[in-house]
Amino acid sequence: MNNLKFILLMIDIFVLIVATQWYELKSTTGFTVSNCTEQQVDSMLSCAAIGRAAKCVTYYFNVYEYLCSWNCKFFENNSHAVGNQGWRKYELKWKENSALGKPVVGSSIFGNNSADWDPSYATDGLVLNRCPKIFHSNFEPSPWIKVDLMNPLTISFIRVFNRPDVLGERFHDVAVEVTNNSDYIQRGFYEGPAATGETVDILCDYPTIARYVRLRITVGSGNSLHIQELEIYTI
């Protein structure tokens, strides 16, 4: 019996170590979270295992109270000096934002006004809490935005900086669809709705290898897709 307990303990430790290999510490200040699922844990490793099992891009661990939070709504604070009373943000390891400066097109441009609402604003690398100068589609059943990564890459997750001023709830039921030719398959999904100013992460199925990445609203009729910045993290 003692041998069996030891074996089970070693399996648990191995699972936790493997889980932490996916994540790294990203921040201790400058963020706010809400609407989390929360649980008391015995260690950060246990929190990492929960985050991985829940297929989360990020999880949050409180080093004072040993609390684990995941499935949170995440907001960047304007001041990075804001503390979080022991909370640490851990995030999936990634190589780079491969969407930065890449060719991008949308299903439409609101009012055909490319000066204010062009898709290129979504991959210009500027997150300035500004509006206009973000991507904004017309109102249609399934608006979309598509990024050409130029080469097939292994995609880890998608990060969307939602509209910063109003109407953030319009970002809902968004499918992440990918292809290397013309046949799209869904490799991630966000139900939402998102909040105004929220940073939304969508984890892709593993492995997801593709050149073209499309975000598309799949539910409803009078939808409009507006995105302040779209990042595609590859490994």
Image: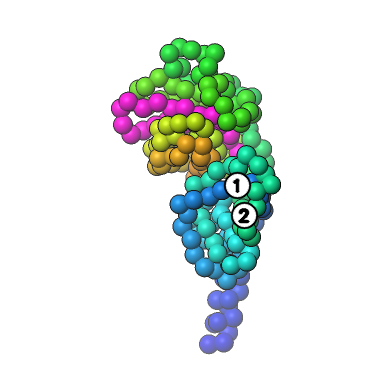
Q: Residue at x 46, y 57 (%)?
A: 37
* In-image side of 98 versus 74 (left or right): right
Q: Residue furthest left?
A: 221
* Residue toward you, 146 or 31: 31
Tag count in the figure? Answer: 2
* In-image side of 25 versus 195 (left or right): right
Q: Residue at x 53, y 87 (%)?
A: 1
Task: Say whether disc 2 or disc 1 marks the residue closer to the N-terminus.
Answer: 1
Quickly name the residue at label 1.
Answer: 31
Q: Residue at x 48, y 12 (%)?
A: 113
Regarding residue 166, the answer to whether it shows in the image is yes
Q: Quadrant of the image for the C terminus?
A: top right
Label 1 residue SS:
strand
10 Å crowding of disc 2: few (<14), some (14-19), many (20+): some
Stretch of the chain drawn in magenta: 209-235
- Residue 94: x %, y % from top left: 64, 44
- Residue 26: x %, y % from top left: 66, 49
Three-letter amino acid code at the position of disc 2 = Asn
In reply to whether residue 233 is colored magenta, the answer given is yes
Q: Are marks 2 and 1 in contact (CB under 8 Å)?
A: yes
Quickly name the residue at label 2.
Answer: 84
In reply to whether residue 5 is colored magenta, the answer given is no
Instruction: Find the distance from the CA under tag 2 to the CA under tag 1.
Output: 8 Å
Three-letter amino acid code at the position of disc 1 = Phe
